[in-house]
Amino acid sequence: MLVRFTKMHGLGNDFMVVDLVTQRIRLSEDKVRRLADRHMGVGFDQLLLVEPPTNPEMDFRYRIYNADGSEVEHCGNGARCFARFVRDKRLTNKDVIAVETAKGKALLTIRADNQIEVDMGAPALSPAAIPFIADGQAAVYSLDVNNQRVQISAVSMGNPHAVLVVDDVDHAPVETLGPALESHPRFPAKANIGFMQIISPTQVKLRVYERGAGETMACGTGACAAVVAGRLRGLLGDSVDVHLPGGVLHISWKGGKEDSVMMTGPAASVFEGQVFL
Ligand SMILES: N[C@H](CCC[C@H](N)C(=O)O)C(=O)O
């Protein structure tokens, strides 16, 4: 069966986006992995599915699969591409789009300057909600990994994140600590691993080793988790530019446990395609 898709990216974090409002397909984990392959498939960090909502108060349902085939709870860069996609495909003419995700909802706003703002919801900080194994909630945890003790913050943006503060992000041990922490036993659902360098209270540099995808050029939920972690450690203000390898995301968070984290950034379509499924 031939299935239409659009190849998109948010600051180089790239996606295959499939409209399941006008198409019907069945996907297995193995099929997602084969589609993700950059030599024998389409090639992407994540697959995004656009579906009719199950909740009548929402405009769409938004499902996300990592390149390794795992379904996940949220994707920030993907949310911006989702908004661009449903408008470009005329699946909606709204400027503010409500989407239901595996763990809640997100509000996507297409701005006049073509940037897209996403209300990412409030962060979850209790170990049980992340999930992260710890005796109690803290701004910083000590973790033993690869024969060393590291300090991390643990934050959920719907999906689990560990955030480390490093002196020089360009020389951070992403290739070694990234996979080791991604699968650390204290993260029972695994985790996305952020390496953050503080430039100032309003500017950080960030690299993210993503759960189920490896290091990506940008990670939206990772940028949100990094700002939350930095704010909890008293290192950042409530409005921060996050400089990722693929570009800059603007993240703001007032700091209250019910306050949403707001993310603003671009979304781009690269090409339209059809693929045999
Ligand atoms: N790898 C993530 C999902 C994609 C998140 C990322 N691409 C973003 O922009 O937030 C996870 O397993 O939770």
Image (spheres, grey):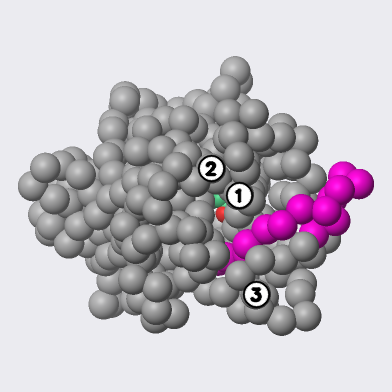
Query: Farthest residue in the left direction?
Result: 112
Gap in angstroms between the C-alphas marked 3 and 2: 20 Å
Which residue is the site of mark 3? 138
Judge by depth and name the residue closer to the eye, 22 or 214: 214
Query: Farthest residue in the top direction?
Result: 39
Element at label 1: strand
- The answer to whether mark 1 is within 8 Å of ligand 1 is no
Element at label 3: loop
- The numbered mark, 3 or 2, whose residue comes first in the sequence reads 3
Gap in angstroms between the C-alphas marked 3 and 1: 15 Å
Which residues lie in the magenta part?
143-157
Which residue is the site of mark 1? 165
- The numbered mark, 3 or 1, whose residue comes first in the sequence reads 3
Residue 170: quarter of image: top right
Circles 2, 1 touching at the beta carbon (< 8 Å): yes
| Image coords of residue 22 (percent x, y) | 29, 49
The residue located at (58%, 35%) in the rendering is 169
Amino acid of disc 2: Gln
Element at label 2: strand
Query: Farthest residue in the right direction?
Result: 147
| Image coords of residue 69 (percent x, y) | 63, 45
Q: Is residue 155 left or right of residue 262?
A: right
Which residue is the site of mark 2? 197
| Image coords of residue 105 (percent x, y) | 37, 70
